[in-house]
Image (cartoon, helix red, strand yellow):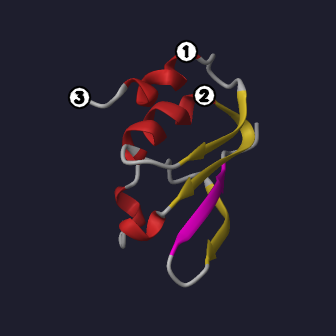
Amino acid sequence: MPPDYVRAIEHQAAGSLDLVVIDGHYRTHVIAAAIPKIARGRWLLVDDVQFWPDLSVLPIPRDWARVDDSSNGLKRAIIWRSPRA
């Protein structure tokens, strides 16, 4: 079972967050829980995505735009934007 911090986002209202930053061992769990909490046209940043050579396994909706993909050569982070209303 994931630790308590993974479920912390469950207490946020749907569409109430402008930016969610995800890091830690349970990224895929938190991504799935965060998606409905992010407001239309707002952002999701996931750190250390280099752990997933195939990003399609991440639970990010296909209609979310990838607006930044950054790497320092060792680590990689991506920012997605939810669709605008």
Q: Quadrant of residue 7?
A: top left
Q: Which mark is residue 1?
A: 3
Q: Residues within 10 Å of mark 1 (few under 14, many from 20)?
A: few
- Give the residue at the far bottom of this rendering: 73
* Sequence order check, earlier mark of 3 and 1: 3
Helix, strand or loop for the magenta stretch, by majority: strand
In screen coordinates, is 1 left or right of 65? left
**In the depicted view, which residue is nearer to us: 2 or 10?**
2
Real-space Cα separation, disc 3 to disc 2, in angstroms? 22 Å
Residue drawn at x 47%, y 42% is: 31
Q: Residue 71: percent from the left, percent from the top? A: 60, 77
* Sequence order check, earlier mark of 3 and 2: 3
The kind of residue tagged 3 is Met
Tag 2's secondary structure?
Answer: helix
Membership of 20 in magenta stretch = no
Q: Residue 42: percent from the left, percent from the top? A: 74, 42
Membership of 78 in magenta stretch = yes
The kind of residue tagged 2 is Lys
Q: Which mark is residue 11?
A: 1
- Give the residue at the far left of this rendering: 1
The kind of residue tagged 1 is His
Magenta residues? 75-81
**In the depicted view, which residue is nearer to us: 19 or 65?**
19
Q: Residues within 10 Å of mark 3 (few under 14, many from 20)?
A: few
Q: Quadrant of the C terminus?
A: top right
Which numbered disc, 2 or 1, marks the residue closer to the eye? 1
* Sequence order check, earlier mark of 2 and 1: 1
Residue tagged by mark 2?
37
Quick check: 79 above or below 72? above
Residue drawn at x 36%, y 69% is: 54
Q: Residues within 10 Å of mark 2 (few under 14, many from 20)?
A: many
